[in-house]
Amino acid sequence: MNEIIGYAFIVVGIAFDIFGCLGLIRLPDVYNRLQATTKCVTLGTCSILFGTIIIKGFTTTGVKAFLCIIFLILTSPVAAHALSRGAHISGVKLWERSVCDKYAEDKKQ
Amino acid sequence: MMTKSKYLRWFLGLSVISAILLFIIIYPIPSLLSWQSPFLSRCFFILMLCFALCLFRVMRGPTSADRAVAVDTLGILIVGFCAILSIPTGRDWYIDIAIAWGLQSFIGALALAKYLEGRGFDE
């Protein structure tokens, strides 16, 4: 029973991974691509690790996977924000149909 | 004319992706892991398809920020890959590799962000 629930979590995680990578291919802009991947791939990987915890139970593998989930949730948004800030400062232009750019307006003031 | 070509491109991309996924699910490449657990070997090959998509963006990103984003995504995907690899083999050091790889990927993403901002590494 534990294996079936864990495999269900792994399937959900792999589906999120595929959709994140499709967004990385498909979307037109650096910021759109970052928005797609950093949500989908982080959630997918956390779901895969959660399935590993459910399958393995309270063993060394399960505890290490729990630590890995906490580490990913802490570090992945920080890296994404740093990358988007660096891209904006280095002068990557937005898509031509983007609506607003609050960060450039703040820098002008 | 414009909308027609757009729908055609959507249809082509969806059909190619779903054909590759069906081919992986129906005929997985025979290996040692597909003898041990046939479900998880299909998961491996689908994750390898994700790696191929990320490497396509690394090769053909218009700017260097695209490449940095794709490399960061690849690092997070490899963490999940190592976690799946630890299930059928039963060895717990694969999760150690996953934690170390996630840490290195995080530090690498921060260094790439600093490079994109135009600052030196020792500021």
Image (cartoon, coloured by chain):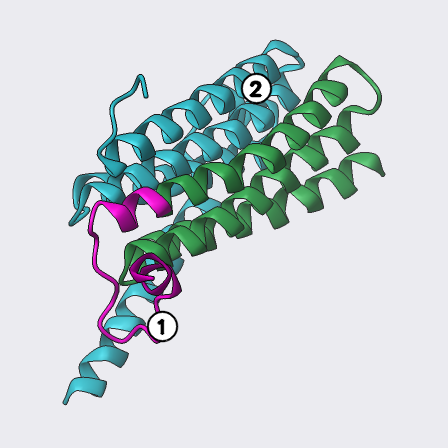
Q: Nearer the viewer, mark 1 or mark 2?
A: 1
Q: Residue furthest bottom?
A: B1
Same chain, marks 1 and 2?
A: no
Magenta stretch: give its range: A85-109
Q: On what subunit does the disc labeled 2 rest?
A: B
The answer for which chain carries disc 1 is A
* Residue under pointer 2: B99
Quadrant location of the C terminus of chain B? top left
Determine contact: label 1, label 2, CB under 8 Å.
no
Q: Residues within 10 Å of mark 1 (few under 14, many from 20)?
A: few
Establish if A49 lies above or below A100.
above
Q: Is residue B19 above or below residue B110?
A: below
- Tell me the colour chain A is drawn in: green
Local crowd at mark 2 within 10 Å, few (<14), some, or many (≥20)? Answer: many
The CA distance from mark 1 to mark 2 is 38 Å
Residue corresponding to mark 1 = A100
Going by the image, does A20 lie left or right of B92? left
Between A105 and A86, the one nearer to me in the picture: A105
Give amino acid for label 2. Answer: Ile
